[in-house]
Amino acid sequence: MTVDTMSARDHMALAERWAAHDSVPFPVVLSHGEGAWIHDTEGRRYLDFHGGYSATNFGHRHPALVAAAKAQLDRLTLSTRAFHHDHFGPFCQELAELTGTEKVLLSNSGGEAVDTAVKIARKWAYRVKGVPDGAAEVIVAGANFHGRTTTIVSFSTNASHRAGFGPFTPGFKVVPYGDIDALRAAITDNTAAILLESIQGEAGIIVPPKGYLAEVRDLCDDTNTLLVADEVQCGLARAGTTLAMDHEGIKADLYTLGKSLGGGLVPVSAVVGRADVLGVITPGDHGSTFGGNPLACAVGREAVRLLATGEFQERSRELGAYLHSRLNELDGVTEVRGRGLWAGVQLDEERVAGRRVTEALAERGLLCKEARGHLRVAPPLVVTRAEIDLGVSIIADVLS
Protein backbone atom coordinates (compact mmCIF):
# COMPACT_ATOMS: atom_id res chain seq x y z
CA MET A 1 0.00 0.00 0.00
CA THR A 2 1.33 3.46 -0.94
CA VAL A 3 0.23 6.91 0.22
CA ASP A 4 -1.48 7.46 -3.13
CA THR A 5 -3.56 4.28 -2.87
CA MET A 6 -4.60 4.70 0.78
CA SER A 7 -8.12 5.82 1.59
CA ALA A 8 -8.94 8.59 4.05
CA ARG A 9 -10.10 5.91 6.48
CA ASP A 10 -6.69 4.18 6.15
CA HIS A 11 -4.83 7.41 6.91
CA MET A 12 -6.96 8.21 9.95
CA ALA A 13 -6.58 4.65 11.26
CA LEU A 14 -2.79 4.89 11.03
CA ALA A 15 -2.81 8.20 12.87
CA GLU A 16 -5.05 6.77 15.56
CA ARG A 17 -2.80 3.74 15.99
CA TRP A 18 0.65 5.31 15.81
CA ALA A 19 0.42 9.01 16.67
CA ALA A 20 0.15 10.43 20.17
CA HIS A 21 -3.28 11.93 20.69
CA ASP A 22 -2.27 15.58 21.03
CA SER A 23 -5.21 16.91 19.00
CA VAL A 24 -8.67 16.04 17.71
CA PRO A 25 -8.50 16.70 13.95
CA PHE A 26 -11.51 16.82 11.69
CA PRO A 27 -12.15 13.61 9.69
CA VAL A 28 -10.52 15.13 6.61
CA VAL A 29 -7.20 13.96 5.11
CA LEU A 30 -5.67 16.84 3.17
CA SER A 31 -3.33 16.19 0.27
CA HIS A 32 -2.58 19.41 -1.60
CA GLY A 33 -3.54 23.06 -1.78
CA GLU A 34 -3.20 26.25 -3.77
CA GLY A 35 -4.10 29.80 -2.80
CA ALA A 36 -7.12 29.77 -0.51
CA TRP A 37 -8.11 26.19 -1.41
CA ILE A 38 -7.12 22.76 -0.08
CA HIS A 39 -7.94 19.34 -1.55
CA ASP A 40 -8.34 16.04 0.30
CA THR A 41 -7.44 12.48 -0.66
CA GLU A 42 -11.03 11.77 -1.66
CA GLY A 43 -11.10 14.45 -4.35
CA ARG A 44 -13.03 17.10 -2.43
CA ARG A 45 -11.81 20.67 -2.20
CA TYR A 46 -12.27 23.05 0.71
CA LEU A 47 -12.16 26.80 1.05
CA ASP A 48 -9.63 27.59 3.78
CA PHE A 49 -10.97 29.95 6.46
CA HIS A 50 -8.53 28.52 8.99
CA GLY A 51 -5.28 29.84 7.56
CA GLY A 52 -3.02 27.51 9.51
CA TYR A 53 -3.31 29.73 12.62
CA SER A 54 -1.88 32.52 10.37
CA ALA A 55 0.96 30.33 9.05
CA THR A 56 -0.53 30.38 5.53
CA ASN A 57 -1.11 34.14 5.27
CA PHE A 58 0.33 34.02 1.72
CA GLY A 59 -1.95 31.14 0.75
CA HIS A 60 -0.97 27.58 0.00
CA ARG A 61 2.10 27.14 -2.20
CA HIS A 62 2.59 30.79 -3.10
CA PRO A 63 4.69 30.58 -6.30
CA ALA A 64 7.39 33.01 -5.16
CA LEU A 65 7.86 31.18 -1.88
CA VAL A 66 7.90 27.76 -3.52
CA ALA A 67 10.47 29.00 -6.04
CA ALA A 68 12.69 30.32 -3.24
CA ALA A 69 12.50 26.98 -1.42
CA LYS A 70 13.21 24.93 -4.55
CA ALA A 71 16.21 27.07 -5.45
CA GLN A 72 17.67 26.74 -1.97
CA LEU A 73 17.10 22.98 -1.84
CA ASP A 74 19.56 22.72 -4.72
CA ARG A 75 22.21 24.70 -2.82
CA LEU A 76 22.34 24.29 0.99
CA THR A 77 19.72 23.52 3.62
CA LEU A 78 21.58 23.43 6.94
CA SER A 79 24.80 24.90 8.27
CA THR A 80 23.99 25.53 11.98
CA ARG A 81 25.13 28.74 13.64
CA ALA A 82 28.67 27.35 13.91
CA PHE A 83 29.17 28.97 10.48
CA HIS A 84 27.89 31.90 8.48
CA HIS A 85 25.79 31.35 5.38
CA ASP A 86 24.82 33.68 2.56
CA HIS A 87 21.15 34.22 3.51
CA PHE A 88 21.55 34.76 7.26
CA GLY A 89 22.80 38.34 7.45
CA PRO A 90 20.55 39.61 4.64
CA PHE A 91 17.48 37.99 6.23
CA CYS A 92 18.21 39.55 9.62
CA GLN A 93 18.69 42.97 8.03
CA GLU A 94 15.58 42.76 5.88
CA LEU A 95 13.38 41.53 8.74
CA ALA A 96 14.65 44.28 11.04
CA GLU A 97 14.00 46.92 8.39
CA LEU A 98 10.51 45.58 7.69
CA THR A 99 9.56 45.67 11.38
CA GLY A 100 11.39 48.88 12.28
CA THR A 101 13.59 47.10 14.82
CA GLU A 102 17.32 46.88 15.41
CA LYS A 103 18.30 43.27 16.08
CA VAL A 104 17.03 39.79 15.24
CA LEU A 105 17.38 36.40 16.94
CA LEU A 106 16.12 33.55 14.77
CA SER A 107 14.54 30.29 15.88
CA ASN A 108 11.94 27.82 14.62
CA SER A 109 8.57 27.82 16.39
CA GLY A 110 6.46 30.54 17.96
CA GLY A 111 6.69 28.91 21.38
CA GLU A 112 10.47 28.82 21.04
CA ALA A 113 10.48 32.55 20.26
CA VAL A 114 8.38 33.33 23.34
CA ASP A 115 10.62 31.20 25.57
CA THR A 116 13.61 33.05 24.13
CA ALA A 117 12.01 36.44 24.80
CA VAL A 118 11.43 35.44 28.43
CA LYS A 119 15.09 34.46 28.75
CA ILE A 120 16.22 37.74 27.23
CA ALA A 121 13.92 39.78 29.48
CA ARG A 122 15.18 38.03 32.59
CA LYS A 123 18.84 38.50 31.70
CA TRP A 124 18.20 42.14 30.83
CA ALA A 125 16.52 42.61 34.22
CA TYR A 126 19.58 41.25 36.04
CA ARG A 127 22.25 42.91 33.91
CA VAL A 128 20.62 46.26 33.22
CA LYS A 129 17.71 46.96 35.55
CA GLY A 130 19.47 45.59 38.60
CA VAL A 131 16.87 43.07 39.70
CA PRO A 132 18.33 40.65 42.31
CA ASP A 133 19.40 37.35 40.76
CA GLY A 134 16.53 34.87 40.60
CA ALA A 135 13.86 37.45 41.48
CA ALA A 136 12.78 38.65 38.03
CA GLU A 137 9.06 38.57 37.31
CA VAL A 138 7.13 38.70 34.05
CA ILE A 139 3.53 39.92 33.99
CA VAL A 140 1.19 38.22 31.51
CA ALA A 141 -2.50 38.46 30.65
CA GLY A 142 -5.27 36.06 31.50
CA ALA A 143 -6.70 33.92 28.65
CA ASN A 144 -3.28 34.14 26.97
CA PHE A 145 -1.90 31.71 24.45
CA HIS A 146 1.85 31.88 23.83
CA GLY A 147 2.62 28.22 23.10
CA ARG A 148 2.81 24.92 24.95
CA THR A 149 6.32 24.56 26.36
CA THR A 150 6.67 23.74 30.04
CA THR A 151 7.48 27.33 30.93
CA ILE A 152 4.69 28.80 28.82
CA VAL A 153 1.95 26.55 30.19
CA SER A 154 3.14 27.59 33.64
CA PHE A 155 1.44 30.95 33.11
CA SER A 156 -1.51 29.76 31.04
CA THR A 157 -4.98 30.21 32.53
CA ASN A 158 -6.37 27.33 30.46
CA ALA A 159 -6.74 24.39 32.83
CA SER A 160 -6.43 21.82 30.04
CA HIS A 161 -3.03 23.25 29.05
CA ARG A 162 -1.73 22.84 32.61
CA ALA A 163 -3.32 19.68 33.95
CA GLY A 164 -0.70 17.01 34.58
CA PHE A 165 2.33 19.12 33.65
CA GLY A 166 3.45 20.61 36.98
CA PRO A 167 5.52 21.59 38.85
CA PHE A 168 5.34 24.92 37.08
CA THR A 169 7.99 27.49 36.36
CA PRO A 170 7.79 30.37 38.86
CA GLY A 171 8.27 34.06 38.16
CA PHE A 172 5.00 35.02 36.44
CA LYS A 173 2.01 37.13 37.46
CA VAL A 174 -1.32 36.99 35.62
CA VAL A 175 -3.65 39.98 35.30
CA PRO A 176 -6.82 40.45 33.21
CA TYR A 177 -6.21 41.42 29.58
CA GLY A 178 -7.08 45.05 28.89
CA ASP A 179 -7.04 46.10 32.57
CA ILE A 180 -4.40 48.82 32.97
CA ASP A 181 -5.17 49.29 36.68
CA ALA A 182 -4.46 45.61 37.36
CA LEU A 183 -1.13 45.98 35.54
CA ARG A 184 -0.18 49.01 37.62
CA ALA A 185 -0.99 47.14 40.80
CA ALA A 186 1.03 44.09 39.76
CA ILE A 187 4.23 45.81 38.67
CA THR A 188 7.15 46.00 41.11
CA ASP A 189 10.85 46.85 41.08
CA ASN A 190 11.47 43.20 40.16
CA THR A 191 9.27 43.23 37.05
CA ALA A 192 11.40 42.44 34.02
CA ALA A 193 8.71 42.59 31.36
CA ILE A 194 5.05 42.73 30.49
CA LEU A 195 4.31 40.02 27.90
CA LEU A 196 1.09 40.46 25.90
CA GLU A 197 -0.49 39.38 22.66
CA SER A 198 -1.23 42.56 20.71
CA ILE A 199 -4.52 40.82 19.83
CA GLN A 200 -5.43 37.67 21.74
CA GLY A 201 -5.96 34.83 19.28
CA GLU A 202 -6.98 31.65 21.08
CA ALA A 203 -9.10 33.67 23.53
CA GLY A 204 -11.44 34.42 20.63
CA ILE A 205 -9.71 37.22 18.66
CA ILE A 206 -9.85 39.78 21.46
CA VAL A 207 -8.81 43.31 20.51
CA PRO A 208 -7.70 45.32 23.56
CA PRO A 209 -9.61 48.48 24.51
CA LYS A 210 -8.61 51.55 22.52
CA GLY A 211 -5.57 53.19 24.11
CA TYR A 212 -4.75 50.23 26.35
CA LEU A 213 -1.51 49.25 24.63
CA ALA A 214 -0.37 52.89 24.62
CA GLU A 215 -1.00 53.01 28.38
CA VAL A 216 1.01 49.80 28.79
CA ARG A 217 3.83 51.41 26.80
CA ASP A 218 3.77 54.45 29.10
CA LEU A 219 3.72 52.24 32.19
CA CYS A 220 6.75 50.31 30.95
CA ASP A 221 8.61 53.55 30.22
CA ASP A 222 7.80 54.93 33.68
CA THR A 223 8.99 51.79 35.48
CA ASN A 224 11.95 50.78 33.27
CA THR A 225 10.15 47.59 32.25
CA LEU A 226 10.25 45.83 28.89
CA LEU A 227 7.16 45.54 26.74
CA VAL A 228 7.18 42.22 24.87
CA ALA A 229 4.54 41.85 22.16
CA ASP A 230 3.64 38.35 21.01
CA GLU A 231 2.71 38.77 17.34
CA VAL A 232 3.28 35.18 16.24
CA GLN A 233 -0.32 34.99 15.03
CA CYS A 234 -1.50 38.59 14.75
CA GLY A 235 1.65 40.08 13.18
CA LEU A 236 2.97 40.28 9.62
CA ALA A 237 -0.16 41.70 7.94
CA ARG A 238 -2.78 39.44 9.53
CA ALA A 239 -4.32 42.41 11.38
CA GLY A 240 -3.97 44.79 8.42
CA THR A 241 -0.64 46.33 9.41
CA THR A 242 2.88 44.92 9.37
CA LEU A 243 2.75 44.62 13.16
CA ALA A 244 -0.58 44.60 14.97
CA MET A 245 0.77 47.08 17.52
CA ASP A 246 1.16 49.57 14.67
CA HIS A 247 -2.57 50.25 15.06
CA GLU A 248 -1.76 52.04 18.32
CA GLY A 249 1.22 53.90 16.88
CA ILE A 250 3.61 52.48 19.48
CA LYS A 251 6.58 50.12 19.53
CA ALA A 252 7.34 47.19 21.80
CA ASP A 253 10.86 46.59 23.07
CA LEU A 254 10.72 43.01 21.79
CA TYR A 255 8.38 41.23 19.38
CA THR A 256 7.97 37.51 18.88
CA LEU A 257 7.20 36.54 15.29
CA GLY A 258 6.58 33.23 13.54
CA LYS A 259 3.86 31.39 11.61
CA SER A 260 3.72 33.23 8.25
CA LEU A 261 7.38 34.24 8.50
CA GLY A 262 8.06 30.80 7.00
CA GLY A 263 5.55 31.33 4.21
CA GLY A 264 3.58 28.24 5.18
CA LEU A 265 6.50 26.15 3.90
CA VAL A 266 9.07 25.89 6.71
CA PRO A 267 9.11 26.69 10.44
CA VAL A 268 10.70 30.09 11.06
CA SER A 269 10.37 32.34 14.11
CA ALA A 270 12.21 35.29 15.56
CA VAL A 271 12.59 37.68 18.42
CA VAL A 272 13.14 41.18 17.05
CA GLY A 273 13.59 44.42 18.92
CA ARG A 274 15.96 46.86 20.57
CA ALA A 275 19.67 46.29 20.05
CA ASP A 276 20.53 47.03 23.68
CA VAL A 277 18.00 44.47 24.94
CA LEU A 278 18.90 41.68 22.53
CA GLY A 279 22.51 42.61 23.18
CA VAL A 280 22.44 40.97 26.60
CA ILE A 281 22.61 37.61 24.81
CA THR A 282 26.22 36.56 24.32
CA PRO A 283 27.75 33.46 22.66
CA GLY A 284 26.82 30.34 24.60
CA ASP A 285 23.72 31.88 26.24
CA HIS A 286 21.35 30.53 23.65
CA GLY A 287 21.30 28.45 20.49
CA SER A 288 19.31 26.40 18.02
CA THR A 289 20.62 23.84 15.53
CA PHE A 290 17.98 24.70 12.94
CA GLY A 291 17.41 28.33 13.94
CA GLY A 292 18.33 30.59 11.02
CA ASN A 293 19.17 27.71 8.68
CA PRO A 294 19.74 28.50 4.98
CA LEU A 295 16.45 27.04 3.75
CA ALA A 296 14.44 28.90 6.39
CA CYS A 297 16.25 32.16 5.69
CA ALA A 298 15.78 31.85 1.92
CA VAL A 299 12.02 31.37 2.34
CA GLY A 300 11.85 33.99 5.08
CA ARG A 301 13.57 36.55 2.85
CA GLU A 302 10.94 35.98 0.16
CA ALA A 303 8.16 36.35 2.77
CA VAL A 304 9.69 39.66 3.85
CA ARG A 305 9.88 40.81 0.21
CA LEU A 306 6.18 40.07 -0.24
CA LEU A 307 5.34 42.03 2.90
CA ALA A 308 7.62 44.93 1.98
CA THR A 309 5.34 45.86 -0.94
CA GLY A 310 2.44 46.58 1.43
CA GLU A 311 0.08 44.58 -0.79
CA PHE A 312 -0.81 42.01 1.86
CA GLN A 313 -1.37 44.62 4.56
CA GLU A 314 -3.72 46.49 2.20
CA ARG A 315 -5.58 43.31 1.22
CA SER A 316 -6.00 42.43 4.88
CA ARG A 317 -7.42 45.86 5.71
CA GLU A 318 -9.80 46.14 2.76
CA LEU A 319 -10.99 42.55 2.54
CA GLY A 320 -11.06 42.33 6.33
CA ALA A 321 -13.54 45.20 6.52
CA TYR A 322 -15.67 43.41 3.93
CA LEU A 323 -15.43 40.08 5.78
CA HIS A 324 -16.47 41.69 9.08
CA SER A 325 -19.42 43.46 7.47
CA ARG A 326 -20.67 40.22 5.89
CA LEU A 327 -20.27 38.23 9.11
CA ASN A 328 -22.19 40.87 11.06
CA GLU A 329 -25.19 40.28 8.78
CA LEU A 330 -25.62 36.65 9.84
CA ASP A 331 -28.40 35.36 12.06
CA GLY A 332 -27.05 33.62 15.15
CA VAL A 333 -24.02 35.94 15.38
CA THR A 334 -23.98 38.26 18.40
CA GLU A 335 -20.58 39.90 17.87
CA VAL A 336 -17.71 40.01 15.39
CA ARG A 337 -14.31 40.95 16.82
CA GLY A 338 -10.90 41.41 15.27
CA ARG A 339 -8.83 43.41 12.84
CA GLY A 340 -7.91 42.79 9.23
CA LEU A 341 -8.68 39.34 7.85
CA TRP A 342 -9.07 37.93 11.34
CA ALA A 343 -12.44 37.58 13.00
CA GLY A 344 -13.74 36.09 16.19
CA VAL A 345 -17.39 35.31 15.57
CA GLN A 346 -19.44 35.16 18.74
CA LEU A 347 -22.32 32.77 18.31
CA ASP A 348 -25.67 32.69 20.06
CA GLU A 349 -24.90 29.98 22.59
CA GLU A 350 -28.55 28.94 22.88
CA ARG A 351 -28.57 28.00 19.20
CA VAL A 352 -25.13 26.78 18.25
CA ALA A 353 -21.81 25.53 19.62
CA GLY A 354 -18.48 26.17 17.96
CA ARG A 355 -17.22 22.61 17.42
CA ARG A 356 -20.53 21.40 15.99
CA VAL A 357 -20.59 24.39 13.65
CA THR A 358 -17.04 23.86 12.39
CA GLU A 359 -17.73 20.17 11.76
CA ALA A 360 -20.83 21.11 9.77
CA LEU A 361 -18.82 23.71 7.84
CA ALA A 362 -16.21 21.10 6.90
CA GLU A 363 -18.95 18.83 5.60
CA ARG A 364 -20.02 21.67 3.29
CA GLY A 365 -16.50 22.45 2.10
CA LEU A 366 -15.33 25.21 4.44
CA LEU A 367 -12.45 24.69 6.87
CA CYS A 368 -12.67 26.79 9.99
CA LYS A 369 -11.72 26.47 13.66
CA GLU A 370 -13.43 27.26 16.92
CA ALA A 371 -11.94 29.41 19.67
CA ARG A 372 -13.52 29.30 23.12
CA GLY A 373 -16.58 27.69 21.61
CA HIS A 374 -17.04 30.26 18.86
CA LEU A 375 -15.80 30.69 15.30
CA ARG A 376 -12.30 31.82 14.43
CA VAL A 377 -12.18 33.04 10.83
CA ALA A 378 -8.73 33.63 9.28
CA PRO A 379 -8.56 33.01 5.53
CA PRO A 380 -5.24 33.39 3.73
CA LEU A 381 -4.60 36.98 2.72
CA VAL A 382 -4.82 35.97 -0.96
CA VAL A 383 -8.54 35.26 -0.56
CA THR A 384 -10.84 37.08 -2.98
CA ARG A 385 -14.08 38.94 -2.34
CA ALA A 386 -15.97 36.20 -4.19
CA GLU A 387 -14.37 33.54 -1.99
CA ILE A 388 -15.33 35.52 1.11
CA ASP A 389 -18.91 35.63 -0.16
CA LEU A 390 -18.84 31.87 -0.70
CA GLY A 391 -17.44 31.18 2.76
CA VAL A 392 -19.92 33.48 4.49
CA SER A 393 -22.80 31.88 2.56
CA ILE A 394 -21.71 28.45 3.85
CA ILE A 395 -21.59 29.79 7.42
CA ALA A 396 -25.04 31.31 6.95
CA ASP A 397 -26.37 27.98 5.70
CA VAL A 398 -25.02 26.15 8.76
CA LEU A 399 -26.37 28.76 11.20
CA SER A 400 -29.82 28.83 9.61
Image (tube, rainbow, N blue to C red):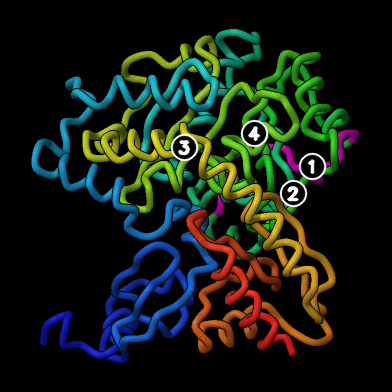
Check the image and report above or below for 347 versus 211.
Answer: below
Task: Choose mark 4 or mark 2, whichever is in front.
Answer: 2
Give the Cα distance between marks 1 and 4. Answer: 14 Å
Task: Return the residue nearer the eye: 399 or 267.
Answer: 399
Confirm whether the magenta stretch covers residue 93: no
Residue 40, picture quadrant:
bottom left
Q: Quadrant of the C terminus?
A: bottom right
Task: Choose mark 1 or mark 3, whichever is in front.
Answer: 3
Image location (x, y in percent) of residue 278: 48, 17
Drawn side of residue 148 relative to residue 134, left or right: left
Residue at image mark 1: 175
**Mark 1 falls on what kind of element?**
strand
Task: Return the residue nearer the eye: 234 or 98.
Answer: 98
**Mark 4 falls on what kind of element?**
loop
**Where are the magenta residues, as a range?**
166-181
Residue at image mark 2: 142
**Residues marked 4 and 3 touching at CB (< 8 Å):** no
Q: Quadrant of the N terminus?
A: bottom left
Give the Cα distance between marks 2 and 1. Answer: 6 Å
Q: Residue furthest right?
A: 181
Q: Point out which mark residue 307 bears.
A: 3
Give the Cα distance between marks 2 and 3. Answer: 31 Å
**Residues marked 2 and 1 touching at CB (< 8 Å):** yes
Query: What amino acid type is highlighted by mark number 3?
Result: Leu
